[in-house]
Amino acid sequence: MNPARRVIHAKAAWIDGEELARDIAVVIESGVITDLIRTSDHLDSPTESCDLLLPGFINAHCHLEYSWLKGRMPRGDNHSFPQWLEAINSLKVDGGGEDYFPAMDRALEEMIIGGTTCVVNSYVDAESMEKLRVTPLRAVALEEVLHLRGDAESALSGALGRSDEDTAEGLLARGLNPHAPYTVNGPMRAALRAVLAQRPNLLTAWHLAETAGEVEMFESGTGELMEFFQRNHIPLPFDQAPRAHPADFMNHEGLWDRCDAVFHWNHPGPEGSSHFAAPRAVVHCPGTHAFFDRPPFPMKEILADGANVCLGTDSLASSDSLSMLEMIRLTGESFPFLTGGELVNMVTRNPARSRLIASSGAKLGTISVGAEADLVLFSHPTEVFDEPTLRQALLARVSQVSSVFVAGDHIL
């Protein structure tokens, strides 16, 4: 057998985001899937075999640089989100010390063991992105622009200069994450509008409507997030409360149409979520939802609006795990109406259809001819033969990732 050619035989595989095929061989050449053979009869001995084969998982939202904060942050309904913000701001003064980069190494290992082959990473510290450049994972880099003080134009121009850097060296794409409407002031919003008008292909994503306190701050100028700003003498993002949902505020500010993805979106606006049909996306972070013991995520309503729902881990400052397999399990346990195929698509096809990934031109999130050979191999003790058994296999703790491939290369 040609050493550049691999054949993976799977008892079951999720094909093209819509079909569970049984007894199938996937042929890989030069990092790309070149054939799907519907029976393994008369094949050369496969290079790999597995019980279940899935496309590589895409972590649609992460902050790798906060990995050193694992176990150090307040959590649960006994602590408010503003208390969490105060804690992280206090801890960040001293940084992660000697554990800063080792913590990222451990986090990346956990991602790979959990089936991740691609990550959308928001960052402030450019050095944290260097970790992703040298790992086998594919990555989209979104530089955070948190700006309530100082010269907005100079802060934005620095981020834009970095977004213009060549993406060939280890990154799929680069863009901006202005974090949230409450962390960007009027001059920065004006600078963003000007830049977005000049750059129609610039990727942008926002943390939006994550908490009820955020919504209350914009709708009435009251609530715990407003009190956090006042207590800590932080400049407000507006002169007067806009009396509008944060999404409506962004629309009024001319930023809504260029929002490619929202992270969290736990409290959708009055217009619903149809704005986030593909190629846009809503990224739900079930680990963070559990960390803060939040009310149920409005999954059914968001899906009914036609939104392109993806999953992410967020950071280890607000989640116990960076395993995408664990995110699938948390989501499946919380929403029993989701099928096995829907759960798989939320970490594969759906994020791959978003502009955050699709703009790169890479064909990810699918097992089909011509797709990149990013794959997750599973061991599972019982037969997977339809979507109910696929769902059972994903949620069963006895199921384990046995191998992970990126571009046909064995990374686990």
Image (cartoon, rainbow, N blue to C red):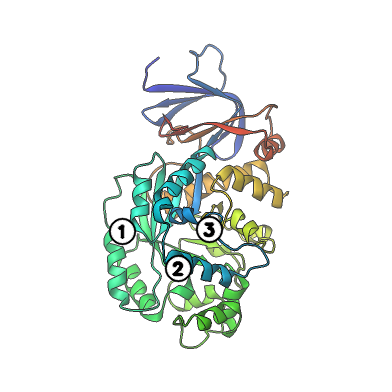
Residue 364 as seen in the image, left or right of residue 19? left
Report the number of numbered marks: 3
Q: Quadrant of the N terminus?
A: top left
Q: What residue type is labelled 3?
A: Ala
Which mark lies nearer to you, 1 or 2?
Answer: 1
**Label 1 belongs to which residue?**
163
Residue 184 as seen in the image, left or right of residue 165? right
**Label 3 belongs to which residue?**
317
Q: Which amino acid does label 1 sit on?
A: Ser
Q: What element carries label 2?
A: loop
For marks 2 and 3, give the CA distance: 30 Å
Of residues 382 and 314, the one nearer the viewer is 314
**Dot placed on the residue nearer the N-terminal end, 1 or 3:** 1
Q: What residue type is labelled 2?
A: Asp
**Dot placed on the residue nearer the N-terminal end, 2 or 3:** 2
Question: Taking 179 as reference, is 115 above or below it?
Answer: above
Label 1 Cα neighbours within 10 Å, binned few <14 / some 14-19 / many ≥20: some
Q: Where is residue 299 in the image (x, y as percent from the top left)?
A: 65, 58
Outermost residue on the bottom side: it is: 240
**Dot placed on the residue nearer the N-terminal end, 1 or 2:** 1
Quadrant of the image occupied by residue 274:
bottom right
**Label 2 belongs to which residue?**
257
